Image (cartoon, coloured by chain):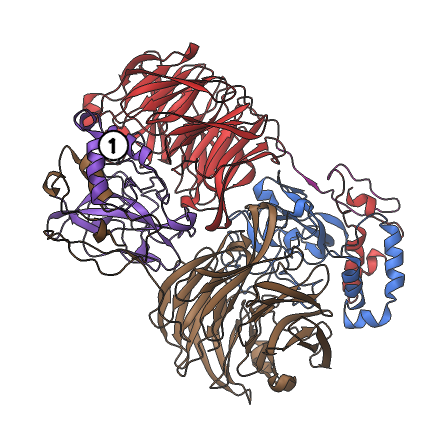
Chain colours: A purple, B brown, C blue, D red
């Protein structure tokens, strides 16, 4: 799991614009107080691009280069709106749900928050992708590959190739699947 | 601790600002506030909407499987003998995958007689396909699917063989596990799950399979066509006694007989459908009259068993289910499309079920209105049928690479 | 690897008929002299039924219950005549050949000899199936499932489910693929 | 010892009797006579037909791969992030699979600059997906494919990330391996392959990728758009120096740049095809003028790079190969069907190759008449093209589950 020093670094260098205007220590102090007792783990991207090619995913769009178009009725499909930035297996297909890990896995203690658009109520929500870890990947069960807004690895808060099982208990760093809970509305 | 505990009403940046140009910092802040504590307590539970927070919030958790019942099914995928394999837990009532567990090379599955746990004996290497070899037994809780016992075995014993259900088994009290050793000499390993250790390798003659008739007795089947009774003590000291020869040399018994420990019944078909039954109640092997599943005319038409697990037995109704089809000789392990149902006591044929799909392995649940499970390796699918009508009621697909073995609880 | 005691047992109980008419010790003595220095490892069945369903094998016959019909032109096909009793992956598809293991694997020290009919010269040959071990199975590369003359596990000299990597060096008991060398003519 | 040594002219049972009823004993005898010795010597070699033995006999052996050349290709299959993965060795000349090696979780492959060895950094657990975690480096001989070095790493370091070729690399002398650490803080691990141990974790700022410019210097790319030069000694003590910022914040550089250590050239396209090149010869970063792969008109038509490894560089001809297609925004990792060829020095477009198939990753061989390698994850196939004409010359299929990364030797 990332320690405070790494956390500081990320804060400091979050983006070029932000870095210049932010008092790192001040922010840390405030957030630290708020989440007292909680690990200071930045919730970085948990997505893993490349695991499943769009063309390979069971419910991928016909054109691997086509525009992402979300729907709001089939939770196990890759184009379900909450999965707008998932790159992994949907836990709902493997004994979990949109918000729960399958039995025997470990919930990662960190995640990446992204904003996804619900086409039904036309609102955007913050989704905190959390990995379920400690079991081998659920090959063939709803592997998805969505890369909306995905940035390179030197911008890890938006990057999508990182295995984010670092913080799971029992050193359970193998990847199984990902849940897509809503954690708030996005503006 | 749920994320609700980590949420702050005093976040220095309002959510309204999160969309737009400055999202990087905002997202990280938001995310940090939601972080789980390291080594936090129970995951899950209802989260309270934080004060002053009207936004929708999902709680997160790790599922537990429902309490196991007779319709709990475990499907093992040896994945064409890969060193990494998987075991799928399925709810027969709902036709739903409950979870999966990692297993190693040629995994042999056991399920507690009360359903409370399941486990496998399998093999791993320190570098995947090579390196230091470890044979081990891992027992998992049927609800949490977390490992509760892990026992490493000494190096020699385990029989690396296509997975047969009765080559690794539990005693009826679920306190001991028995596994077969092929090399360097035939033996049965007695493992105490209570003491979490291998007690002893018990030498046996050239016999195979392990059918525990009670907690201190098991039967095996020997090359010469007899059964062997082994009576053992807690320390692994054992006495052996052979029965009469009960089948001819050219009556080839399948590698995957059905066994109900609670009924004390072994049901064992041959390649041609002649079906032997052994009653081991009272720790004595009583050979019931064998019955022919197929008439001479049917045999001439090619009717014969075929598949991996070709036979299942329902205890309460005393019914034998036999997977069969019309086939060429020496295709006894190829899939079949039909299940023939017989009364165990008389061998009378009661039904012929057209499954409607190629099937490699069958099993039945032990409840009053049993389900018939039909596994297709090629389709990677477990089909769930009503055992009485034969009608398909549900199915679970995408079961790994080449799922082959079904285990249920004799509960 | 099987030790002499196991070997003796197998000899003694090879079949009901044979067992009654054979002087075990005499045979062992003679063979032992012949293969002085060689391990007394019975070459038992190395086939593994059920790894690949006939219907699943790439070049399987259309009917999984049909009669085995060998051909003599495509070494990588499951119905190539030498593979009459193979149940595993053909090494020729994975960097080996009909008679050699792929690089990095270990040749099992034991094998199972079967008689296969060559449809071209109409002769039967003894094939000694040898396993190449110590690497994970070559998933998807010529998995075959032929069960001609295959007997149950209590007749292991004809059984086909045993992983016969017991004797490979370096404890390399994982299974990779199988070669099908000719070791003689069969009658 | 070959089986010839074990063959006897005095076998007590003639081969003529082997067919027929008494085959069981005969087969076993025959087989026993052919048994390999335990721990025998070199396997292989020509067997002599035994005296008085006119029967056909095949010799058995374990293959060695041919001597590696510039057309030796390694294709890694992370298998959708499975904990057991595979690395395929391919002969580009023959379009033939030479062998395969087992690798673990998110394997990162390295290939010696002279082709003499290859290896991976990956992760295993004692119970497959769980249990004790071990990060390790395994180096294998390019001909025998046997492991020659195995180094276990301390627990924290390894970056578990989709496999990028330049996140784990070798120094040009092939004596040290450098790997990236993400957590708990950014660092580069210096591993001595000579001493077979981790020398030190060298702290670095928020920078990524490792481009060794000689045996004691490497460059990284930092979040702020600069490069970082790290000069290190054998003991892992290091000095760091940042360069100018060379690209804008919204110029998103791919995670998989091309790098030729022998040319000292990094070629690094953005999502839109603007291609940066850094010359690191003499251990100084010289930024060449970036070129646009696509005109404004082409960009308006949707032309942009896309795939996993989207760029390759041929040293001798100074050519840049870019994988691209017409696409929607944010599909930068989806496969493409075309390769655009540019002169490195001028950025002049020389060719547009229609591969004729969806391609996730490309690479080129470094010989005079290079091959262009085009890997399709979905088709599990490496297509081999002539890099000049673009014509497909051969292909190797059935490469595991989802092959993604190509490694060649910069020889």
Query: Vertically, is B201 above or below C96?
Result: below
Q: Per the image, is D55 magenta?
A: yes
Q: Which percent across, then down, holds residue D181?
A: 41, 32
D116 up-or-down from B41: above or below:
above
Q: Is residue A87 visible?
A: no
Tag 1 residue: A11
Q: Position of residue C175 (x, y in %)?
A: 60, 50
Q: Is residue C68 above or below residue D393?
A: below
Of all chains, the one bearing label 1 is A
The residue furthest top is D282
Nearest the viewer among D348 and B204 is B204
| Predominant SS along the magenta part | loop
**Quadrant of the image containing the N terminus of chain B:** bottom left
Q: Nearer the viewer, residue D262 or D355?
A: D262
Residue B411's place in the image compared with D294, above or below, is: below
Q: Is residue B382 left or right of residue B109?
A: left
Provide the residue span drawn in magenta.
D42-65
The single residue placed furthest to the bottom in the displayed view is B346
Please say whether residue D300 is visible from this viewpoint.
yes
Label 1 sits on a secondary structure element that is helix
Instruction: Classify residue D195 as left or right of residue A118.
Output: right
Please indicate whether residue A10 sits to the left or right of residue B172 in the image.
left
Q: Position of residue D44 (x, y in %)?
A: 73, 38
Q: Is residue D229 magenta?
A: no
């Amino acid at each position: 799991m990332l320690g405070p020093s790494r956390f500081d670094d990320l804060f400091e260098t979050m983006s070029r614009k932000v870095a210049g205007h932010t008092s790192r220590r001040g922010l840390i102090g405030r957030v630290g107080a708020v989440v007292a007792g909680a690990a200071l783990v930045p919730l970085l991207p948990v997505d893993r691009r490349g695991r499943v090619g769009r063309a390979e995913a069971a419910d991928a769009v016909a054109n691997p280069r086509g525009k992402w178009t979300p729907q709001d009725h089939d939770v196990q499909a890759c184009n379900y709106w909450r999965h707008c930035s998932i790159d992994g297996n949907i836990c709902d297909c493997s004994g979990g749900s949109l918000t729960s890990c399958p039995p025997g896995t470990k919930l990662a203690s960190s995640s990446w928050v992204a904003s996804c658009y619900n086409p039904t109520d036309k609102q955007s929500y913050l989704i905190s992708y959390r990995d379920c870890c400690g079991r081998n990947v659920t090959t063939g069960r709803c592997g998805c590959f969505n890369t909306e807004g995905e940035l390179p690895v030197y911008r890890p808060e938006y990057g999508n190739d990182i295995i984010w099982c670092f913080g799971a208990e029992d050193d359970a760093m193998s990847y199984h699947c990902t849940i897509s809970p809503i954690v708030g509305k996005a503006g | 601790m749920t994320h609700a505990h980590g949420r702050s009403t005093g976040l220095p940046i309002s959510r309204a600002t999160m969309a737009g140009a400055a999202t990087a910092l905002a997202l990280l802040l938001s995310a940090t506030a939601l972080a789980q504590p390291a080594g936090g307590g129970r995951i899950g539970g209802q989260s309270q909407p934080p004060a002053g927070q009207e936004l929708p919030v999902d709680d997160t958790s790790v599922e537990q499987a429902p309490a196991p019942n007779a319709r709990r099914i475990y499907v093992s995928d040896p994945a064409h003998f890969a060193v990494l394999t998987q075991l799928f837990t399925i709810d027969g009532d709902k036709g739903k995958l409950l979870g999966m567990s990692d297993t190693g090379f040629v995994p042999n599955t056991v399920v507690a007689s009360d359903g409370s746990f399941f486990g496998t004996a399998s093999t791993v290497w320190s570098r995947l396909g090579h390196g230091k070899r470890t044979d081990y037994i891992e027992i998992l809780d049927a609800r949490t699917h977390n490992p509760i016992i892990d026992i490493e075995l000494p190096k020699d014993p385990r029989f690396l063989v296509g997975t047969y259900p009765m080559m690794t088994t539990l005693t009826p009290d679920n306190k001991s596990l028995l596994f077969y050793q092929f090399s360097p000499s035939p033996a049965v390993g007695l493992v105490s799950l209570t003491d979490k250790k291998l007690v002893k390798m018990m030498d046996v003659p050239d016999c195979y399979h392990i059918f525990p008739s009670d907690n201190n007795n098991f039967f095996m089947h020997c090359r010469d066509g007899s059964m062997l009774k082994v009576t053992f003590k807690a320390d692994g000291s054992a006495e052996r006694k052979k029965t009469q020869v009960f089948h001819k040399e050219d009556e080839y018994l399948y590698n995957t007989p059905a066994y109900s420990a609670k009924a004390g019944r072994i049901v064992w078909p041959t390649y041609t459908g002649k079906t032997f039954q052994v009653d081991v109640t009272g720790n004595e092997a009583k050979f019931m009259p064998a019955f022919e599943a197929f008439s001479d005319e049917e045999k001439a038409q090619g009717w014969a068993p075929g598949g991996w697990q070709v036979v299942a037995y329902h205890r309460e109704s005393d019914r034998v289910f036999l997977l069969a089809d019309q086939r060429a000789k020496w295709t006894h392990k190829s899939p079949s499309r039909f299940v023939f149902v017989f009364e165990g006591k008389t061998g009378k044929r009661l039904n012929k079920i057209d499954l409607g799909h190629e099937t490699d392995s069958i099993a039945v649940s032990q409840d009053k209105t049993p389900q018939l499970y039909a596994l297709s390796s090629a389709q990677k699918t477990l089909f769930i049928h009503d055992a009485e009508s034969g009608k398909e009621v549900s199915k679970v697909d995408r079961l790994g690479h080449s799922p082959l073995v079904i285990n249920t609880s004799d509960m």
